[in-house]
Amino acid sequence: MRFTSRTSSDGVSEQLFTLGEIPGVLWTPEGATGTRPLILIGHGGGQHKKAPGVLFRARRFVADRGFAVVAVDVPAHGDRPKDEALDRIASENRDRVAAGEELAPLIAEFQARVARRTVPEWRAVLDAVQEADHVGPGPVGYWGVSLGCGLGVPFVAAEPRVRAAVLGLGGALATAEAAARITVPVEFLVQWDDERVPRSQSLALFDAFASAEKTLHANPGAHAELPAHELDSSVRFFTRHLT
């Protein structure tokens, strides 16, 4: 892993890095030393590692609880190069929806394809980041909704270092099998009027988690209308399970 820049503001240090072809960013308390909990944030579709929502959550986890937070660009997003195969599939899916096909199965199939690349990438990112002296081999959490859920479920299922996960705005079509292998505590977010993910599929995914501790948070509103108070809940959730 090669750090390429460092900036600090309001007690939070931000370091950009590259790991092979993967661009990422690491946030830690300014002047931090020693081991601390680490949260990996998976960004949403069409977003990137420093999207406003990612940045807001990362700074909150660092400033309020002294955690480390890492986020990376997924393939064909942010500073990653364009991917002709993924672009072609996305274009074909738009045409299929315009022709009357259901959106949710197409999203699920696309996310499953991308997850085959991101799961090993994110595990390598954890390896590299936890070698840093100001992060260390502490407990790991995962936060991801929408695309971050579709990629996060197979990641959490495959990565034993993750001790707690906040997931949501996703369905069971492509991830139910992986969800059945997840036993860590889960906080799951559902938008009751989600126009992209059928409510029945969201509830089926929640049901598929094998976790003894899992909590469903259902809020009114569309896919992109996740209420701000859910960040407060996430902070409490990770504090309880990672410290």
Image (tube, rainbow, N blue to C red):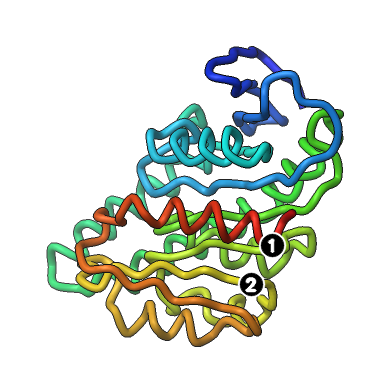
Q: Position of residue 82 (x, y in %)?
A: 44, 34
Find disc 2 in the rendering and name its residue.
185
SS label for mark 1: helix
Q: CA distance from mark 1 to mark 2?
A: 8 Å
**Around disc 1, counting alpha carbons within 10 Å, would you say few (fewer than 14), some (14 to 19), or many (20 or more)?**
some
| Cβ–Cβ under 8 Å for marks 1 and 2 | yes
Q: Quadrant of the N terminus?
A: top right
Q: Quadrant of the C terminus?
A: bottom right
Report the amino acid beneath label 1.
His
Residue 21 is left or right of residue 194, and the answer is: right
Q: Would residue 125 be visible to someone looking at this image?
A: yes
Residue 30 is left or right of residue 203, and the answer is: right
The nearer-to-camera label among 1 and 2 is 1
Report the amino acid beneath label 2.
Pro
Q: Position of residue 63 (x, y in %)?
A: 58, 33
Q: Nearer the viewer, residue 86 or 68?
A: 68
Q: Nearer the viewer, residue 133 or 20?
A: 133
Q: Position of residue 48 (x, y in %)?
A: 45, 36
Mark 2 or mark 1, which is nearer the start of the sequence? Answer: 2
Q: Nearer the viewer, residue 142 or 97?
A: 142
Q: Would residue 82 be visible to someone looking at this image?
A: no
Q: Quadrant location of residue 200?
A: bottom left
SS label for mark 2: loop
Residue occupying the point 62% across, 47% down: 40
Residue 191 is left or right of residue 7, and the answer is: left
Find disc 1 in the rendering and name its residue.
241
Residue occupying the point 67% across, 48% down: 122
Q: Quadrant location of residue 214?
A: bottom right
